Image (cartoon, rainbow, N blue to C red):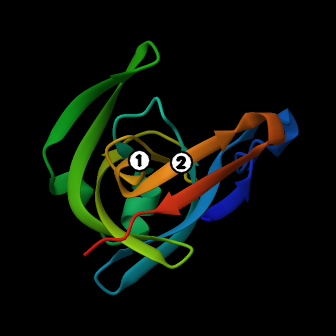
Amino acid sequence: MGLIFDYSSLPGLERTRVLAPIVPITFTNGIYSFPTYALVDSGAENAVISTVVADALHINWSNIKQEKGFGMGSQFLFHRFNDLKADIENNEFVMDVCVVEGIYAFKCILGRNDVFKKAEIKFKGYENKFELIFRKMN
């Protein structure tokens, strides 16, 4: 059995009453840590964090090559940062993230190229729950 989470409101959007698969996550970059919440999104290819999260982790994102991304009919600017440490309920792993400019401070999305490769995910929308079963990593 894995970790079971209730669907919950996106931080800052509680008034909408829209529930989504959200996990508590802590990122670590060297001596700097930042706890936050992340949306688990099967439609997202890569992990996304805001510049506010990156700044708290002392990631010098403005000195990393800027790229353009596309999603849901719009484009955005981002910077790739590799090998960021992540922890979900004492399950540690390393992942690459896209530091995206111009999104809300709480913004963090986990996609197919990160947590989906580390864990089996069972979405139980009919119960407003989901389960993460982390693989044993060497």
> Label 2: which residue?
121
The residue drawn where x is 76% and y is 41% is 13
Q: Quadrant of the C terminus?
A: bottom left
The residue nearer to you, when weighing 84 against 43, is: 43
Residue 44 x/y as whole percent: 42, 33
Circles 1 and 2 in contact, beta carbons < 8 Å: yes
Residue type of the residue flagged with mark 2: Ile
Residue type of the residue flagged with mark 1: Phe
Residue 57 bears which disc, if any? Answer: none
Label 1 residue SS:
helix
The residue nearer to you, when weighing 14 against 103, is: 14
Does residue 107 appear to the left or right of 74 in the view shown?
right
The residue nearer to you, when weighing 2 against 68, is: 2
Residue at the front extreme of this rendering = 1
The residue drawn where x is 64% and y is 41% is 123
State which tag comes first along the sequence, 1 or 2.
Answer: 1
> Label 1: which residue?
116
Residue 133 x/y as whole percent: 52, 60
Label 2 residue SS:
strand
The residue drawn where x is 61% and y is 58% is 23
- Using the image, determine if residue 105 lies above or below residue 70: below
